[in-house]
Image: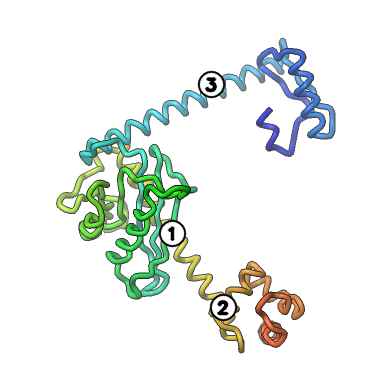
Amino acid sequence: MSLYQSREYIPAEILLSFELPEHDRILLSDYLTERSGRRVTIRTPKKGASKYLCAMAVKDAADHSANYVRHESDREKTLVNLAQMLCLEVVPQRIEAYDISNLGDEHITAGMVVAVDGKLKKSEYRTFNIRSTAIQDDYASMTEAISRRLAHIGEENSSMSECPDLILLDGGKGHVSVIKELMREIPVFGMVKDEHHKTRTLTDEENELNIARHPDVFRLIYEIQEEVHRYTVGRMTGAKRKTLKTSSLEKIHGIGPAKSKLLLSHFGSLTALKNASEHEIADVPGISQTDAENIYNHFRGQTKTKNNGD
């Protein structure tokens, strides 16, 4: 029943591989009929093609369940192997990985991705906009990001209250050396890339540990390193785009950073603002009639210039 509570489409007939008590069958049929707006029949076929379909569904479910159990077992073995390789005191149930991305000295961003029980958990990814340095400094940026992250451990009602069992850094010995100064209890390793920017080894600052001999561990580390890089670059690029939009608005007379953010927040996108009427722009709290007129004329002037050039 829970399957059809979240689905808009409900079929006219539902086949079961098992017998359902008559009272429950009628109750369920009436409920689904009311939800779908048409009569829904529920039955357990005794023979023929319908019974064969039910048998196939049962087999597929059993196969899926077996595959799930096997994959869970494989992930657990991988984490045990990783713990043995790194000489960890516990099997790392929660792994956090960090990377730094920037465009020169601008939009310095630290990304954090999380793997729980060997599976990436996107709901716990976090981004840190670096504030402590105005120049490109990966060590200082990583230090700020992880310091801010660790400050939340043990906090009530915080999504980052849980302490990681292992921290991985997209970087080498230098990164590990700097971050080890922040903590003594949490193991820290660097994910070292080769000349092709692909995962090569792990480092504990003093030694490099070859993970290529352990395909399961290599796949896990490779997946985590690629994901943290993808995520961090994506968030940095998003911040850059947002800045470009606000800076383009600041070219309009009377519009500064604060009003630019107000406008983009109100309309949701630069395109929507460009298509807005002067009246709609003036309705934005904090935007005067003069501002609205300047904005409207600015974009209409751009449109007219483009049209004349066609």
Q: Which residue is mark 1?
A: 127
| Comparing labels 1 and 2, the label whose residue is closer to the camera | 2
Instruction: Tell me which amino acid carries mark 2.
Output: Ala
Residue 153 appears in the picture as rendered: yes
Residue 55 falls left or right of residue 185: right
- The Cα atoms of the two marked residues, 1 and 2, are separated by 23 Å
Which residue is located at x 75 percent, y 80 percent?
A: 278
Which residue is located at x 77 percent, y 25 percent?
A: 13
Residue 42's spot in the image, x, y percent? 76, 21
Q: How many marks?
A: 3
Which residue is located at x 27 percent, y 34 percent?
A: 81
N-terminal-most mark, 1 or 3: 3
Q: Quadrant of the N terminus?
A: top right
- The Cα atoms of the two marked residues, 2 and 3, are separated by 58 Å
- Tags 1 and 2 in contact by the CB under 8 Å rule? no
Which residue is located at x 66 percent, y 16 percent?
A: 17
Q: Which mark is residue 258?
A: 2
Q: Which residue is mark 3?
A: 62
Instruction: Tell me which amino acid carries mark 3.
Output: Ala
